[in-house]
Image (spheres, grey):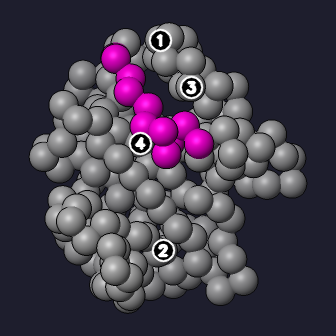
């Protein structure tokens, strides 16, 4: 678990990921947090089913690098966002992050704080040298989060930007 000023970041286990997908409040009950109306995007559902569940079931994988982390607002004891690390560090020590703040919670600085927390955690992981992320060109809020945390734009496609932060 990672703690920041306002947030707790919890890496979900294999069983917790299955509860997350069910969106039946069983995850909130297991985590002892307030129930919420969870909306799971098709992209996140696919990532959980195709990557996170197989990776968290694989004892060879370090599941902290291969799962969804739920972000809990400490003051209200409820989930407000999610963050993931896509996979274990590659041969260059790079990890990729992705994130999303629940619609009702956007604009409150939670994700900027959560990304800062994951950066501090990553600095303690000897194999991690760089954090990368991708954003849509039109998603100003998403890339502002990265800029506030010191990421620099490292590439561009027709529709998106890539970002990187050297940490070790």
Few, some or many residues within 10 Å of mark 2 (<14, 14–19, 20+): many
Q: Residue at x 13, y 44 (%)?
A: 108
Name the secondary structure under disc 1: loop
Q: Is residue 168 above or below residue 30?
A: below
Tally the numbered discs.
4
Marks 3 and 4, how far apart at CA:
13 Å
Magenta range is 36-46
The residue that label 1 is drawn on is 25
Marks 3 and 1, how far apart at CA:
10 Å
Marks 2 and 4, how far apart at CA:
17 Å
The answer to if 116 sits in the magenta stretch is: no
Few, some or many residues within 10 Å of mark 4 (<14, 14–19, 20+): many
Q: Earlier in the sequence, mark 3 or mark 4?
A: 3
Q: Quadrant of residue 163?
A: bottom left
The residue that label 3 is drawn on is 21
Marks 2 and 1, how far apart at CA:
32 Å
> Viewer-proximal residue, 35 or 160?
160
Q: Residue at x 51, y 80 (%)?
A: 130
Contact between labelled residues 2 and 3, with CB atoms less than 8 Å apart: no
The residue that label 4 is drawn on is 82
- The answer to whether any part of residue 109 appears in the image is yes
Contact between labelled residues 4 and 3, with CB atoms less than 8 Å apart: no
Q: Residue at x 69, y 45 (%)?
A: 50
Tell which residue pokes out farthest to the left in this image.
Answer: 107
Q: Earlier in the sequence, mark 2 or mark 4?
A: 4
């Amino acid at each position: 678990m990672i703690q920041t000023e306002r947030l707790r970041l919890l890496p979900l286990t294999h069983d917790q990921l299955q509860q997350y997908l069910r969106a039946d409040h069983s995850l909130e009950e297991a985590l002892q947090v307030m129930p919420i109306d969870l909306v799971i995007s098709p992209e996140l559902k696919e990532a959980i089913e195709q990557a996170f569940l197989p990776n968290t079931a694989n004892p060879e994988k370090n599941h902290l690098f291969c799962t969804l982390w739920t972000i809990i607002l400490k003051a209200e004891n409820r989930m407000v966002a999610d963050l993931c690390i896509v996979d274990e560090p590659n041969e260059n020590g790079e990890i990729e992050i992705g994130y999303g703040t629940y619609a009702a919670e956007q604009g409150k600085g939670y994700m900027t704080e959560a990304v800062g927390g994951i950066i501090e955690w990553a600095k303690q992981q000897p194999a991690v040298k760089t954090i990368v992320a991708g954003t849509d060109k039109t998603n100003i809020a998403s890339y502002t989060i990265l800029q506030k945390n010191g990421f620099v734009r490292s590439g561009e496609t027709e529709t998106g930007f890539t970002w990187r932060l050297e940490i070790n």
